[in-house]
Amino acid sequence: MKTRAAVLTGYHKPFEIREVELDEPRAGEVLLKMSAAGLCHSDLHMVDGDNVVRFPIVGGHEAAGIVERVGPGVTRVQPGDHVVCSFIPSCGVCRYCSTGRQNLCNQGATILEGSMPDGTFRMHDPELGDIGAFCMLGAFAEYSTVSELSCVKVDEWLPLDKAVLVGCGVPTGWGSAVNAGGVKPGDTVVIYGLGGVGMNAVQGAAHAGAKYVICVDPVAFKRETAQEFGATHVFATAEEAAKAVTELTWGDGADQAICVVGVMTEEVIRDAFDVIGKGSTVVVTGVANPADLTVHVSGSDMVFNQKTIKGTLFGSSNPQYDIVRMLRLYDAGQLKLDELITRRYTLDQINDGYQDLRDGKIIRGVIDYSK
């Protein structure tokens, strides 16, 4: 079959809307009719060269839709099911899944390549050849053939244009605070970056009972919005935040510092390391070009003050469990999703959406396939 899709053909190029050939689902695969796709900074990393990927590739890794058809042997979903896709597949049986680290599943090894785990592709173009699907999803397409290992069945009464956000940004941010950071009642948390991931780190820290949720972002609109999600203090600079932490904690420092800026830098991590106190933790969620060495801190400070710097993928969440859990919290009114969406776009407006993201005009944009 044919489907319209937003294709990247190289670094520093815009998305091209093309009609591509899409294969039917093979064994263990699902044909998904997309309902919505989230605009996440990770797709900009492909454009800017911070993610080293194979071109051509269809972007989009926050996906929600309805199952059209399934291939042989599929057991997790059936036609008509509503699903949210995790950008990390989870097989359930590899070393990492079987030890409770589903976010590190071995089946995710090809997500930047854009191929299925067996190295083959499901999208094709007479001019471009085989086309990858970012994170094995390619959510910026009206239809996509995906692995059942990426699919999480969700309650059908939930609006998919909101539920789509729990495929990446919500659990990544929430989990950065709650899972990786281990935020507890009474803690002081500093969050660097208030985009779609950072705003959910705010939600997670507040939900976990942090006494102070201190946020740093140069964009006034984002600082104002963060206060609606649970931030207690907001600042434009790390220096202002550090001064406040010293005053609020009587010099003890923060318990956690969560680094979720769009492009990670050495300066952000150094600021985070300096703001935490003894026995405390820096969580690094944002990424930069793999060639950039962004962690440079005092080893003596780390040892004598027993500080920890740790990375986290998908907020150290379990896709099959935590996606459903996040949506149940939303259904109970304990998690904000509607408020995260600043603007909706058509597939043809995708480059406008990413320009708005670059310009700091949106928290989260959504491609709405019903428009």
Image (cartoon, helix red, strand yellow):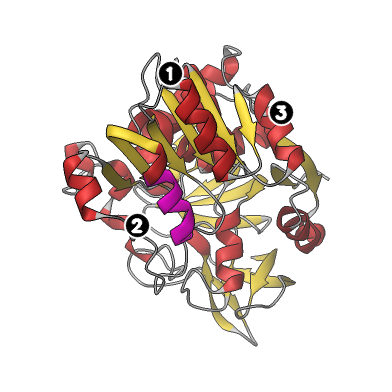
Left or right placement of residue 188 versus residue 59 in this view:
left
Q: Amino acid at mark 2?
A: Gly
Q: Which residue is mark 2?
A: 108
Tell me where residue 15 appears, x and y as whole percent. Answer: 71, 70
Q: Which residue is mark 1?
A: 208
Which residue lies under the disc numbered 3? 339
What is the C-alpha distance between the residues marked 1 and 3?
A: 20 Å
Residue at 63% from the left image edge and 21% from the top image edge: 157
Magenta region includes residue 266: yes
Report the mark closest to the observer, 1 or 3: 1
Looking at the rendering, the stretch of residues picked out in magenta corresponds to: 265-273
x 54%, y 26%: residue: 203
Residue type marked 3: Glu
Query: Viewer-nearest of labels 2 and 3?
Result: 3
Which quadrant, please, contains the N terminus?
Answer: bottom right
Residue 224 point in image, percent of width and height:
73, 31
Does residue 158 appear in this view? yes
For the point 47% across and 57% down, the residue is: 267
Of 262 and 161, nearer the camera is 262
Q: Residues within 10 Å of mark 2 (few under 14, many from 20)?
A: many
| Amino acid type assigned to the residue bearing label 1 in the image | Ala
